[in-house]
């Protein structure tokens, strides 16, 4: 039997970006093996609908908007965050609504404040979901595991420091940055 | 059960104490076997494991094995969990590693010396005990230990411990944060001194200089910080035999009371033996006394004083943290986790009444009290702010750039009621008793903890710091001391001033378990100096010891 993970690597290389994101969601939610065959079929690859479940592309776009597009966000942890939000009944529907009101809207708001002005965070559930999206990206932690440490925004948003275990250079600490 | 090796000297434990002795002995032609309970560590892999670990605690990069379990800071705070059997009344808060190379894998690397007065607490202050040696006796070995480990320091500063030689390397530059604290401290009559530390500031012994990975605890990714693997590898290269995953469970005695060797258990539960002319116990201050007390069918050895496992000490830590003034960011999270401290409270004239202390200034923001920023973000007020985008990033940056923390190490006096004994009724996965600990902090140490927090508060005042928090309980320092105390009187101590057991003449103990009192200096340089002194004594005694059969 072949190792499903190495199949995934081969698939990843062959697929266009949108489909690769679908694959990552599959990986994160543990549906990989079943999803594998479908992912090869062009009909289902990247087939997001405007009312259907939130795709990884949409989640990444929402994440970029909520962070004012200040950081380059990586698909791989994004897939884990999306899978976690979708699994949680407190976030699943509000997330879909949030995407509906932002990424799927006719005129997509481009910043966090524009999302607020649009009224998309007026409901408690939507506001809490947006917060949770930000907590995931800042902490890099999801469901008690590390999705991404070095790229977690809690570190990436500090221009004066590097995440521990990566160097800043000898003696750079002795002056103000 | 079989005898798997025979050597002149059998060393139990491959941490800095055992590794230094092994290295010195093999270089002088003495045959050595080192038995180590845990497995080897691959540095690159350990760095990866650290990055993946959700809680970036000191133990996070290292394997937890069923056969060599160890305490972790995560289980210390949760009664009834973990490796220690904590009997209270207070939890014992310090941990150690059980892997090849031991706990210096995750130590910080601070290497102050003890003060001359620390050796004479009874004579000078009427409390604790005197050491069976003086500062002057140990000073030449401090010089050697600093050279072996590679200590960087500023010889022009008076740390209160007279020096006969300079530091092997120039000091680690103090941080910008230290300089801000120094400016404030001077307004209240205190000075900030650079901390001597076993961290390369230039290429030293073929090891790279520090490049500011800001991760000394739990793992230096490039080995710029000293760890015991350096001496262990050297010893093995020169012919020492290292047996890892070998959990020593007893020291074997002959009928005449001399040590014959040790018995150890493998992960699969089978037992084997290694024989030697001398045995060196280097398993640190919890496991060394535990092994001695488990020996002789559980009746214990080397214990005519009754003090094996007693006088357990730590440097209980007073921890305070705050945010610096709004117009004075301090930019922590850069460089070695501590580069300076306030040392004058170590020489307090009140040492007869209350504990002295040294203030460690942290460069690590709130990692010690709260956790890595990735975790702190989930705990703090940020998620509740209903803020996002660039505004949230700016607010977070502003917050972290102002984080300050002080950790003061206080002194604990030897108290026979603070004990570690084998829990014969609570065994680990391979059937070896877990450590049972009784521990309390007395009024003497509490006085020092209170004084330290009062000083932190004055410093915060001078810094115009905001959101000041003084943690209302003491943290463990990771400094485990006492438990096989040395002294001149065999009725009142376990070993003599060279670490030689009063009762078992061919057994030596190395490590901070020997400390009769613990002063306020981080212990490792002192235990390294003592170990080098022990090696000389042991080698001199070797010709007169019985053959290994
Ligand atoms: C978070 C932290 C930070 C620290 N920072 C500093 C600092 O800045 N400065 C300082 O001076 N000190 C510091 N320390 C303390 C320092 O790590 C110890 O003093 C030092 O490692 C003790 O050396 P050792 O060789 O005696 O013991 P260890 O390094 O613990 O080595 C003992 C070895 O014995 C082995 N062993 C245990 N049981 C058995 C058995 N049954 N059979 C065989 N082998 C066994 C262990 O696996 C281990 O490898 C720190 C400690 C911690 C926890």
Image (cartoon, coloured by chain):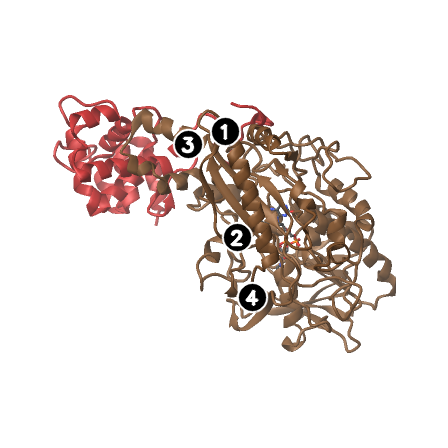
Name the side, left or right, on which B153 lies relative to B421. Answer: right
Element marked by disc 3: helix
Residue B176, x across and y down, in percent? 56, 27
Q: Quadrant of the C terminus of chain B?
A: bottom right
- N-term mark: 1 or 3: 1
Residue B40 versus residue A147: which sits nearer the camera? A147
Name the residue rendered at 18%, 33% in the picture.
A98
Q: Are marks 4 and 1 on the same chain?
A: yes
Residue B445 place in picture, x, y as percent: 60, 55
Q: Secondary structure at mark 2?
A: loop
Q: Chain A appears what colour? A: red
Q: Quadrant of residue B190?
A: top right
In the image, residue B19 sits, relative to residue A146, either above or below, namely: below
Which circle marks residue B399 in the picture?
A: 3
Q: Which residue is mark 4?
A: B438
CA–CA distance between discs 1 and 3? 10 Å
From the image, state whether disc 4 or disc 2 is nearer to you.
Answer: 2
Q: Chain of mark 4?
A: B
Q: Are marks 3 and 2 on the same chain?
A: yes
Frontmost of labels 1 and 2 is 2
Number of callouts in the render? 4
**How far is mark 1 from mark 2, CA to CA?**
26 Å
Asked if badges 1 and 2 are on one and the same chain, I answer yes
Image coordinates of residue B134 in percent, x first then y, are 80, 52
Residue A145 to residue A76: above or below: below
**Residue B539: which quarter of the image?**
bottom right
Asked if marks 1 and 2 touch (Cβ < 8 Å), the reply is no
Residue B482 in sight in this render:
yes
Judge from the rendering whether residue A150 lies leftward or rightward of residue B135; answer left or right: left
Measured along the vertical axis of the image, is residue B4 above or below residue B299?
Answer: above
Q: Are marks 3 and 2 in contact (CB under 8 Å)?
A: no
Marks 4 and 3: CB-CB under 8 Å? no
């Amino acid at each position: 039997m072949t190792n499903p993970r190495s199949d995934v690597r081969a698939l990843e290389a062959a697929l266009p970006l949108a489909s690769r994101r679908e694959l990552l969601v599959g990986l994160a939610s543990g549906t990989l093996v079943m999803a594998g065959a479908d992912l090869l079929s062009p009909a289902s690859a990247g087939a997001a609908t405007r009312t259907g479940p939130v795709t990884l592309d949409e989640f990444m776009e929402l994440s970029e908007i909520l962070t004012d597009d200040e950081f380059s966000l990586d698909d791989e942890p994004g897939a884990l965050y999306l899978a976690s939000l979708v699994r949680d009944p407190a976030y699943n529907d509000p997330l879909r609504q949030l995407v509906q009101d932002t990424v799927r809207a006719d005129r997509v708001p481009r910043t966090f404040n524009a999302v607020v002005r649009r009224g998309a965070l007026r409901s408690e559930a939507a506001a809490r979901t947006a917060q949770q999206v930000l907590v995931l990206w800042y902490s890099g932690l999801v469901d008690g595991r590390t999705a991404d440490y070095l790229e977690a925004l809690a570190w990436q948003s500090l221009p004066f420091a590097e995440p521990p275990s990566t160097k800043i250079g000898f003696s750079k600490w002795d002056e103000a940055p | 059960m079989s005898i798997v090796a025979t050597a002149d000297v059998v060393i139990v434990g491959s941490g800095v104490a055992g590794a230094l002795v092994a290295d010195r002995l093999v270089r002088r032609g003495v045959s050595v076997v080192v038995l180590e309970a845990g497995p080897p560590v691959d540095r690159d892999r350990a760095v990866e494991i650290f990055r993946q670990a959700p809680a970036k605690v000191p133990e996070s990069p290292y394997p937890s094995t069923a056969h060599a379990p160890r305490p972790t800071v995560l289980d210390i705070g949760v009664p009834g969990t973990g490796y220690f059997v904590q009997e209270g009344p207070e939890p014992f808060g310090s941990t150690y590693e059980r892997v090849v190379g031991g706990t210096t894998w995750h130590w910080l690397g601070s290497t102050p010396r003890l003060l001359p007065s620390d050796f004479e607490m009874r004579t000078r202050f009427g409390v604790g005990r005197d050491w069976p040696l003086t500062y002057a006796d140990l000073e030449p070995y401090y010089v050697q230990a600093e050279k072996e480990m590679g200590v960087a320091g500023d010889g022009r500063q008076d740390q209160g411990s007279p020096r006969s030689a300079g530091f092997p390397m120039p000091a680690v530059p103090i941080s910008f944060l230290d300089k801000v604290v120094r400016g404030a401290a001077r307004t209240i009559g205190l000075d900030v001194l650079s901390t001597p530390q076993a961290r390369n500031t230039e290429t030293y012994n073929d090891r790279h200089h520090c490049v500011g990975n800001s991760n000394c605890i739990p793992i230096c990714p490039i080995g710029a910080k000293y760890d015991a693997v350096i001496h262990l590898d050297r010893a093995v290269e020169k012919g020492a035999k290292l047996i890892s995953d070998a959990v020593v469970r007893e020291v074997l005695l002959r009928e005449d009371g001399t040590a014959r060797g040790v018995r150890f258990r493998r992960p699969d539960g089978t037992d084997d033996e290694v024989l030697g002319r001398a045995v060196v116990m280097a398993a640190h201050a919890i496991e060394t006394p535990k092994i001695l007390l488990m020996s002789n069918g559980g009746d214990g050895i080397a214990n005519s004083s009754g003090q094996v496992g007693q006088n357990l000490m730590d440097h209980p830590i007073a921890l305070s943290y705050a945010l610096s003034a709004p117009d004075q960011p301090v930019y922590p999270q850069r460089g070695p986790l501590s580069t300076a401290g306030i040392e004058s409270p170590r020489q307090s004239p009140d040492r007869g009444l209350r504990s002295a202390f040294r203030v460690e200034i942290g460069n690590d923001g709130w990692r010690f009290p709260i956790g890595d920023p990735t975790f702190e973000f989930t705990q703090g007020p940020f998620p509740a702010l209903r803020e996002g985008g660039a505004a949230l990033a700016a607010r977070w940056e502003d917050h972290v750039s102002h984080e300050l923390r002080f950790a003061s190490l206080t002194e604990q006096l030897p108290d026979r009621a603070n004990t570690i004994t084998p829990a014969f009724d609570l065994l680990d996965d391979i059937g070896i008793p877990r450590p049972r600990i009784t521990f309390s902090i007395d009024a003497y140490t509490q006085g020092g903890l209170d004084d330290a927090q009062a000083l932190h508060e004055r410093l915060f005042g001078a810094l115009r710091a905001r959101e000041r928090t003084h943690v209302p309980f003491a943290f463990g320092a990771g400094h485990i001391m006492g438990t096989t105390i040395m002294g001149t009187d065999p009725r009142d101590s376990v070993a003599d001033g060279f670490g030689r057991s009063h009762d078992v003449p061919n057994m030596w103990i190395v490590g901070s378990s020997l400390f009769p009192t613990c002063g306020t200096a981080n212990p490792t340089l002192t235990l390294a100096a003592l170990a080098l002194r022990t090696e000389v004594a042991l080698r001199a005694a070797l010709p007169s010891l019985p053959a290994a059969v």
